[in-house]
């Protein structure tokens, strides 16, 4: 495969230049796609790629300028090699034992079953003292707040209910009841779920200790009801050091997702939205998004009626406050059904887009025959950093029309649910920690994802998160402040 080389601009992580010396993100974008490779006709006209000039948080500027571009200064001579070597965790790693330390860290390995939900209701409804909240969040997630009911089933169970394995569908109250009744007697667990919360919990656990920097402050905004499930959701996130900032909706019913995993590690998901189907923009949400360094918006929100207005307003306020905006694609059919809404936000506000290969192709209107490489490269003409995962084949970062390949971190697959969410947390953690090497960030993200795939459950465990964070800090420290990516493979067709 033909290769070319790219060199990233290396900046000192210890003594970064003054803020005013950095150009705005908009100046890093190309004005239009370049004919670097044959591709299908471009999607329908997109919104303007020009964005307002802004000055992000200093740590984020260092990471962005290191990753997004430009040849090194005159006279700069990079070191001879720099690929981060990260070995993966074994897929059969034992669960950490229950201990006081694990509880203090907010370990959710032993996720409560339905009978334990009431235990958390009172705690979940308690308000957090304003004095206990940081002046500014490192990451704020805006997404659907759903309680997950997950269990292992066989193919016959799915066939009996007429469900297509490996799919995701919205269900009404009656359909949800039918599936839950069929699960009666089966072993299942309940957790504060949702794609976004998986990423936020993993990010919180990676950053809960001052390894490579101060502890990270993580929060989420969304919609939960005042019912027991709403209290359970808030309490479980708080236990994982993720603050759920939105007040419960009076007389609302919290949404749920039933996750049915078969022995081949495929998951079938049934979502009942409930109160989670409405996320309104108000002064409370405006205050939250104006005080964050990174705003990450869950793609599933685009499915909800009228939510696009909330997303646009939140992104506008976050950008004015100097935050980076990240968008998760969430689901290929979601993109296809709300294509114009996605591009309204991605084309105008997104600094980072997270997608898998199917979702990346959906963004580009590419057929399934197109490679994830071509989709990655194409999207990177419109978004400063594109992250595309391709299952066991690895993943790609797209930057200015080039795709950097990230090898997979091997593991024995147990449950693929949450792999993409875990990968996104690794990318954000690397950026927040000021890493200057995309290959190193990608290696961490791949390890986080493989750790989750090698276990039952969607959440990165506390013990594993600490080991990953320590390993990443060690690699960053030993690779030096300046890293050479001349050896990075830039894929081309």
Image (cartoon, rainbow, N blue to C red):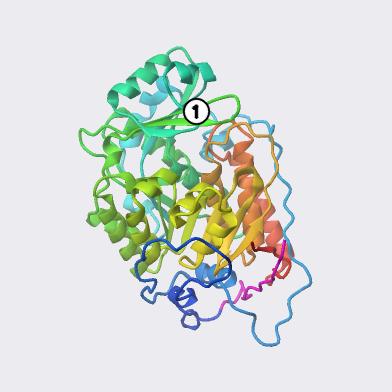
- Evaluate whether residue 303 shows in this view: yes
Q: Nearer the viewer, residue 118 or 472?
A: 472
Density class for disc 1 (Cα within 10 Å; few <14, some 14-19, many ≥20) is some
Left or right, 370 with respect to 333, comes to right
Q: In which image quadrant can residue 94 be found?
A: top right
Q: In which image quadrant can residue 96 be found?
A: top right
Residue 391 in magenta? no
Q: Which residue is mark 1?
A: 165
Residue 335, position in %: x, y?
Answer: 39, 49
Q: Nearer the viewer, residue 17 or 65?
A: 65
Residue 45, position in %: x, y?
Answer: 36, 66
Q: Nearer the viewer, residue 50 or 80?
A: 50
Residue 460 lies, with reference to residue 191, above or below; the image says: below
Instruction: Please give the name of the residue rendered at 45% of the width and 42% of the height, measured from the top-left corner.
Output: 195
Count of picture labels: 1
Instruction: Please give the name of the residue rendered at 66% of the width and 54% of the height, measured from the top-left corner.
Output: 443
Residue 207 lies, with reference to residue 455, above or below; the image says: below
Residue 5 in magenta? yes
Residue 282, position in %: x, y?
Answer: 22, 54
Residue 125 lies, with reference to residue 69, above or below; the image says: above
SS assignment for the magenta stretch, majority = loop
Residue at the far bottom in the pictured view? 74
- Please tell me whether mark 1 sits on a helix, a strand or a loop: loop
Residue 193, position in %: x, y?
Answer: 43, 36
Left or right, 374 with respect to 221, comes to right
Residue 103 lies, with reference to residue 408, above or below; the image says: above
Residue at the far right in the pictured view? 80
Give the magenta-colored segment's residue range.
1-16
Residue at the far top in the pictured view? 185
- Evaluate whether residue 208 shows in this view: no
């Amino acid at each position: 495969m033909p290769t070319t080389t790219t060199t990233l601009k290396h900046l000192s992580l210890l003594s970064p230049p003054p803020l005013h010396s950095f150009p705005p993100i908009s100046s890093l974008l190309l004005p239009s796609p370049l004919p670097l490779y044959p591709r299908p006709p471009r999607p329908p006209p997109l919104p303007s790629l020009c964005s307002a000039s802004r000055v992000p948080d200093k740590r984020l500027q260092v990471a962005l300028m290191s990753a997004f571009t430009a040849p090194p200064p005159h006279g700069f001579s990079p070191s001879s090699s720099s690929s981060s070597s990260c070995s993966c965790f074994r897929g059969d790693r034992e669960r950490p034992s229950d201990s006081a330390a694990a509880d203090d860290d907010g370990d959710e390995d032993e996720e409560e079953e339905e009978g334990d939900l009431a235990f958390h209701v009172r705690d979940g409804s308690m308000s957090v003292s304003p004095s206990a909240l940081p002046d500014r969040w490192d990451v704020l997630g805006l997404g659907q707040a759903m309680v997950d009911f997950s269990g292992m089933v066989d193919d016959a169970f799915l066939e009996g209910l007429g469900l297509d394995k490996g799919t995701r569908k919205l269900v009404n109250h009656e359909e949800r009841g039918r599936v839950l009744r069929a699960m009666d007697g089966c072993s299942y667990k309940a957790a504060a779920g949702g794609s976004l919360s998986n990423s936020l919990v993993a990010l919180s656990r990676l950053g809960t200790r001052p390894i490579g920097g101060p502890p990270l402050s993580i929060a989420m905004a969304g919609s939960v009801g005042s019912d027991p499930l709403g209290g359970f959701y808030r309490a479980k996130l708080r236990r994982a050091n993720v603050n759920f900032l939105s007040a419960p909706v009076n007389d609302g019913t919290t949404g749920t997702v039933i996750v049915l995993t078969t022995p081949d590690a495929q998951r079938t998901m049934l979502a009942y939205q409930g109160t989670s189907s409405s996320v309104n923009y108000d002064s409370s949400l405006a205050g939250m998004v104006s005080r964050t360094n990174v705003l990450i918006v869950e793609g599933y929100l685009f499915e909800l009626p009228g939510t696009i207005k909330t997303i646009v307003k939140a992104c506008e306020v976050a950008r004015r406050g100097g935050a980076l905006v990240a968008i998760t694609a969430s689901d290929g059919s979601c993109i296809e059904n709300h294509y114009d809404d996605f591009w309204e936000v991605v084309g105008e506000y997104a600094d980072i887009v997270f997608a898998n290969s199917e979702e990346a192709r959906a963004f580009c209107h590419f057929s399934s025959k197109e490679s994830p490489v071509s989709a990655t490269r194409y999207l990177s003409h419109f978004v400063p950093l594109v992250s595309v995962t391709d299952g066991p084949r690895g993943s790609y970062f797209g930057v200015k029309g080039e795709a950097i390949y990230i090898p997979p971190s091997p593991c024995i697959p147990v449950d693929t649910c949450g792999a993409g969410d875990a990968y996104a947390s690794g990318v954000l953690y690397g950026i927040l920690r000021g890493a200057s090497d995309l290959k190193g960030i990608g290696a961490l993200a791949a390890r986080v994802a493989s750790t989750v795939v090698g276990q039952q459950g969607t959440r990165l465990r506390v013990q594993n998160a600490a080991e990953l964070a320590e390993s990443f800090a060690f690699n960053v420290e030993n690779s030096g402040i300046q890293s050479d990516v001349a050896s990075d493979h830039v894929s081309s067709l």
